Image (cartoon, rainbow, N blue to C red):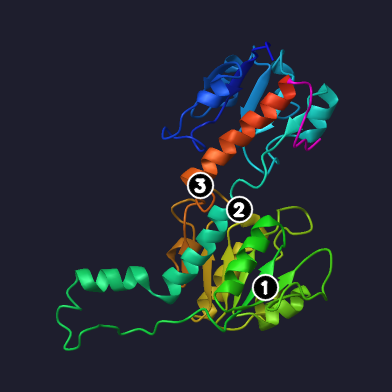
Amino acid sequence: MDHKPNIVYLDAFTANPGDLPWTELESLGDLQTYEFSTEEEAVERAKNAEIIITNKFYINENNIGLFENLKYIVVSATGYNNVQLTAATKAGIPVSNVRGYSTTAVAQHVFSAIFALFNRTEYYNYKVRKGAWSESRDFCFYDHSIEEVAGKKMGIIGYGSIGKSVSKIAEAFGMDVLVYNKYGTGRQLSEHIHERALDEIYEQCDIISLHVPLNESSKRMINAESLAKMKSNAILINTSRGGLIDENALAGHLQKNSSFFALLDVLTIEPPTDLNFLTNLDNCLVTPHHAWASKQARERLLAGVADNIRSYLSGQIINQVL
């Protein structure tokens, strides 16, 4: 593998804000990394690139022809909707993504959010700082109930690698798990994990977690109709894509049902505007699309990018999405 290509990473900041080395990618060619790139900057920066790495920078029919030496695109993510595949196909440029790197991190975040809500961690830390425990007559202090996850019924919509990981953790915590799996609705997958139809999950589950990709069939699958089927005190979790939820319908549902909670790591518009209505609701906990971003997950992501490029240089395309 003597060939050392020009490799340009157009928006590297998300994967590596400075806490990880570039050593493996640097060993594969002449690597240039940029935190972010406008379209104008990208055309200049990658005009001689044989390989472009992109996370969210959009490559489409309007700009792909401007990268005159481009022969391979690597998306440093699993989702690849930022590359117009028809344009890449027309130009004869293969596109690869990286899969499975964030499974552990996202599954951990799902339960981190649940426990933060059930144990009221932030609330009690605030109360301790304000002196409530110091003023308590008893050895402990609590003025709001704490819940246990054991015995709760959890619904998992989407049974890929992340959905399976979340299901196993839920089972280990003593939860009954209903999963929506596009390959079936009736199988018993383990002692406490069962396939069910979507409506059964909506109607029966105490906690519902979304783990499906965003596409035309899943867009706004959580809407006024599906929300109306859920328990009045259900918890809805979304660590996938904001577009899975009709946010106006969710906001209205949260305002009318104070016992219903949403735990969201993704929104339709990211970053959100200061006026985003969901971030201001007491029964909606929003985190900044960081469920995937553990240091270990980002290490796996960069290693996956390197694996794709190494295979390309050896004459083989892996993880190809087109």
Secondary structure under badge 1?
A: helix
The reply to whether the magenta stretch includes residue 151 is no
For the record, the magenta segment spans: 314-322
The amino acid on which the numbered mark 1 sits, given as a three-letter code, is Ala
Horizontal and vertical percent for residue 62?
73, 25
Which mark is first along the chain, 2 or 1? 2
Secondary structure of residue under mark 2: helix
Q: Indicate which disc, 3 or 1, sits on the residue closer to the N terminus.
A: 1
**Which badge, 3 or 2, is on the more N-terminal residue?**
2
Residue 142 is situated, as x and y percent measured from the top left of the image, at: 29, 83
Question: Disc 2 designates what residue?
Answer: 103
Residue hosting label 3: 293
* Residue 283: image location, x then y, percent: 46, 73
Between disc 3 and disc 1, the foreground one is 3
User: Which one is in front in this view, the residue at disc 1 or the one at disc 2?
Assistant: 2
Answer above or below: position of 35 versus 158. Answer: above
Q: Residues within 10 Å of mark 2 (few under 14, many from 20)?
A: some
Instruction: Give the Cα separation between the discs numbered 3 and 2.
Output: 10 Å
Q: Is residue 179 above or below residue 102?
A: below
Amino acid residing under circle 3: Ala
Front of the two marks 3 and 2: 2
In the image, 268: left or right of 226? left
Q: Secondary structure at mark 3?
A: loop
Q: Main secondary structure of the magenta part?
A: loop
The answer to whether any part of residue 266 appears in the image is no
Amino acid type, label 2: Thr
**Residue under label 1:** 224
